[in-house]
Amino acid sequence: MGATTFPRVGGHPAFDLVDTVHWRLDDARAIDTLPDVEAVLEWCAEIDLVDSDALRALASAARETAAAEHTAILALREAVYEAVFEDSPDAVALIAREHIDALSRSRLHRDGDRWHWHPPADRTGPRAAIALLAHDLLTSDLRAARQCGDDACGWVYLDTSPRRNRIWCTAAGCGNRNRVKRHHARTRA
């Protein structure tokens, strides 16, 4: 795995997955930081999503199998975005199907006083774990779900600020760029 650092501003891992598309709202600048299954594996490892056995299984899967899993994971990523921000019934249905499938292949494991779902330690493990995350997000309180106020960014996050008035994905990135842009516009006028 490489030294890639993926954005972690979403406040929920499913939103962090959505944020692996940079400049989502500008087709000319859009960058998918998960262009292949290797990048998906890096993202999964970075957020400690599945155990190393599942990562190795997907990494060693046949090219067609790995490509199919990659396509399914990207479809889940887009379904999260479309379900939350576009109210897409098709996206919700996809997440529901993937969640049911993930549960059928996962096992419950007790950790102290709590039970947790553990996705399969096979090539489908990352997709199953992502489906569980997507379902967790969709069944949570989404009143704090926001999209960055930048015209091109498109990153999404849960606004947990005290007054629930966060506008930018990051103050240092989009916030600063837009403040400078407004300042220049005012000084030129």
Image: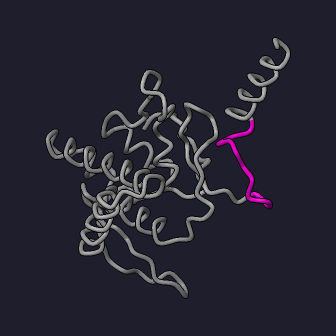
Q: Is residue 74 magenta?
A: no
Residue at the image point whose x is 82% and y is 14% from the top: 189
Image: magenta residue range? 161-171
Residue 80, by quadrant, is: bottom left
**Location of residue 46 with respect to 50 vertically, above or below:** above
> With respect to residue 69, does 114 lie above or below?
below
Q: How many tags in the picture?
A: 0
Viewer-closest of 134 and 1 = 134
Relative to 173, is 42 on the left or the right? left
User: Residue most toward the bottom?
Assistant: 113
From the viewer's perspective, is residue 57 above or below residue 110? Answer: above
Please, which residue is most extreme toward the front here?
189
The one nearer the camera, 57 or 90, is 90
* Quadrant in the rendering for residue 42: top left
Q: Percent from the top left, x then y, of residue 44?
A: 43, 50
How far across and how far down the image is residue 153, in percent?
Answer: 56, 34
Residue name at image x 47 percent, y 57 percent:
84
In which quadrant will I find the N terminus? top left
Name which quarter of the figure residue 5 lies in: top right
Q: Is residue 165 magenta?
A: yes
Among all residues in the image, which is located at the extreme right? Answer: 187
Which x, y percent locates residue 17? 46, 48
Q: Main secondary structure of the magenta part?
A: loop
